[in-house]
Image (spheres, coloured by chain):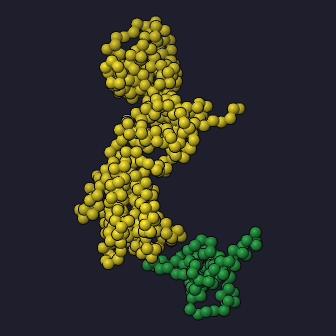
């Protein structure tokens, strides 16, 4: 048996919990966050801050907050300021304020009892712990929506107004609330809302080029040089973009595609590995969808699948697909249909989610349509279609 | 502080167990110490008080929660920690 060769250099860099040193396309937001909390480094006793970070899944909310947390704590240590950053995922604690605060206190007192007192007492305890240890705390509440959903205005109000019950004492507790959008905030009462909504950092979804930059950064850290070709990166970025600009999805796909490349004993991650990876994440191909296609739709798709299999490319042009379709027609002794009709079929296949089309203007002669096979491994598709066409013949 | 004789402090099996326990886990509240010892709250509190008065233990109160830990600043505590560690190393 030949020695095992992996495409990975360090796959932990693709782990969901890994926070990269550099966050591409989030520099502005990171600087803004640092600006909001700059008082922690200069006059930490005099104020506390509340910041909301919003954005869709995979827009980098958690990574941004954690990167910021690590950076500001390091800076505070250099300036002899006792600052801690604690990141809590509220959903993990079922949106329960008591359990969330319990987690924060346990960072300082790991054996703090888990029962026998109220959430309000625990909030008092947290303040006392911070006083005793002379610590300033930035508490990041990830998936903040679940806390609002479970506990409502009262809990959020208590958290944001903790300082009001400790007049003339140093301010110690700042909050970063991370949530998908501001809709959840709307359900809070007016006074709670007003304490929260003054500083909002809204993360926009990544575009395809930004996703390519993110993927390239991770590839440098996680893969051996030249293990991931540009075609593959483009395909993953395209898929992540179609999943609402979800970088997390793209990174997971990258890892999974690497696993498929290893399993097939390949030394690089081909676009076909990505398709296999996608079909393992999303049950993408419904056989009934293929069965309902017309004869020429099946033939065209078969030709496309074969071309993807042969070329190992991420996308092919409509002209290339049409050429391959003509050859498949010759094989089956069928007269090819017109270009216009074929174009209609391409639209149907795209609407079904089997293929994806994009208009490209990078060619030398005007615009051309590019066809992607994003979700289904070409080999699998070819096998299914051949079986269906044989059945149709008999 | 009462300043008991060394034999009075260490003559109790439960007090030695408390010291070993806190040396191992850091800090615990009274109920949890009682649960781990398998004795009632009152007995546990009594022993903890003796060790606190001797300056070997340190008490932190958070509302109703009373947390005990070894008093790292006390020379007596350091001697106790040494004793336990050397004893357990030799046992292995």
Position of A69 with respect to A12 (left or right) is: left
Given residues A2 and A121, the one toward you in this image is: A2
Q: How many badges with numbers are in the image?
A: 0
Is residue A255 shown above or below A175? above
Q: Is residue A95 visible?
A: no
In the image, is B54 to the left or to the right of A210? right
Expressed as whole percent of the image width and height from the top left, the position of residue A171 reads 35, 71
Q: Seen from this angle, which residue lies furthest left?
A: A190
Between A366 and A383, the one nearer to me in the picture: A366
Viewer-proximal residue, A195 or A232?
A232
The residue located at (50%, 12%) in the rendering is A394
Coordinates of residue B54 in the picture (x, y in percent): 59, 88
Q: Quadrant of residue A320?
A: top left
Please give left or right for residue A135 compared with residue A190 in the image: right
Find residue A294 and report its horizontal and vertical position in percent. Answer: 39, 17
Image height of A59 relative to B21, above or below: above
The colour assigned to chain A within the rendered structure: yellow
Let me know if residue A319 appears in the view. Answer: yes
Comparing A352 with A173, the one in front is A173
Q: Residue furthest front?
A: A79
Q: In this rendering, would A335 be left or right of A378? A: left
Q: Residue at x 72, y 75 (%)?
A: B86
Residue drawn 65% across and 77% down? B81
User: If the image is split into quadrants, where does the N terminus of chain A sit?
Assistant: top right
The residue depicted at 42 percent of the width and 47 percent of the height is A23
Residue A207 x, y percent position in the rendering: 35, 38
In the rendered view, tell whether residue B45 sits above or below residue A24: below
Chain identifier for the green-coloured part of the image? B
């Amino acid at each position: 048996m030949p020695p095992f060769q992996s495409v990975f250099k360090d796959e932990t860099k693709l782990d969901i919990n890994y926070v990269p040193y550099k966050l591409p396309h989030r520099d502005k937001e990171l600087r803004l966050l640092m600006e909001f909390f700059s008082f922690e480094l200069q006059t930490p006793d005099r104020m506390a801050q509340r910041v909301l970070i919003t954005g869709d899944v995979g827009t980098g909310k958690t990574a941004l907050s954690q990167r910021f947390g690590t950076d500001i704590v390091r800076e505070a240590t250099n300036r002899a300021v006792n600052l801690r950053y604690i990141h809590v995922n509220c959903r993990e604690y079922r949106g329960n304020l008591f359990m969330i605060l319990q987690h924060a206190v346990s960072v300082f007192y790991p054996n703090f009892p888990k029962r026998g007192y109220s959430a309000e007492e625990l909030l008092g305890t947290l303040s006392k712990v911070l006083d005793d240890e002379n610590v300033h705390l930035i508490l990041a509440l990830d998936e903040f929506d679940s806390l609002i959903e479970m506990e409502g205005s009262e809990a959020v109000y208590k958290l944001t107004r903790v300082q009001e019950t400790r007049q003339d004492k140093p301010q110690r507790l700042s909050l970063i609330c991370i949530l998908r959008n501001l809709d959840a905030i709307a359900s809070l009462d007016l006074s709670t809302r007003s304490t929260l909504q003054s500083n909002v950092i809204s993360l926009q979804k990544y575009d395809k080029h930004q996703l390519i930059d993110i993927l390239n950064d991770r590839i440098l850290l996680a893969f051996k040089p030249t293990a991931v070709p540009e075609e593959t990166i483009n395909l993953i970025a395209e898929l992540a973009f179609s999943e609402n600009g979800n970088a997390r999805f793209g990174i997971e796909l990258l890892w999974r595609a690497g696993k498929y490349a290893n399993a097939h004993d390949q030394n690089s991650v081909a676009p076909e590995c990505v398709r296999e990876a996608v079909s393992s994440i999303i049950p993408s191909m419904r056989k009934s969808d293929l069965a309902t296609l017309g004869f020429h739709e099946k033939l065209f798709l078969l030709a496309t699948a074969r071309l993807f299999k042969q070329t190992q490319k991420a996308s092919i042009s409509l002209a290339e697909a049409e050429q391959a379709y003509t050859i498949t027609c010759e094989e089956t002794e069928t007269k090819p249909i017109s270009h216009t009709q074929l174009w209609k079929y391409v639209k149907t296949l795209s609407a079904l989610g089997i293929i994806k089309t994009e208009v490209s203007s990078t060619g030398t002669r005007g615009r051309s349509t590019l066809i992607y096979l994003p979700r289904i491994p070409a080999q699998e598709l070819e096998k299914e279609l051949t079986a269906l066409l044989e059945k149709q013949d008999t | 502080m009462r300043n008991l004789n060394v034999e009075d402090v260490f003559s109790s099996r439960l007090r030695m167990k408390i010291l070993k326990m806190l040396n191992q886990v850091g800090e615990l509240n009274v109920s949890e110490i009682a649960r781990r010892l398998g004795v009632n709250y009152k007995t546990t509190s009594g022993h903890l008080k003796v060790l606190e008065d001797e300056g070997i233990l340190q008490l932190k109160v958070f509302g109703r929660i009373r947390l005990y830990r070894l008093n790292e600043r006390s020379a007596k505590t350091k001697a106790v920690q040494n004793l336990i560690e050397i004893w357990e190393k030799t046992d292995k």
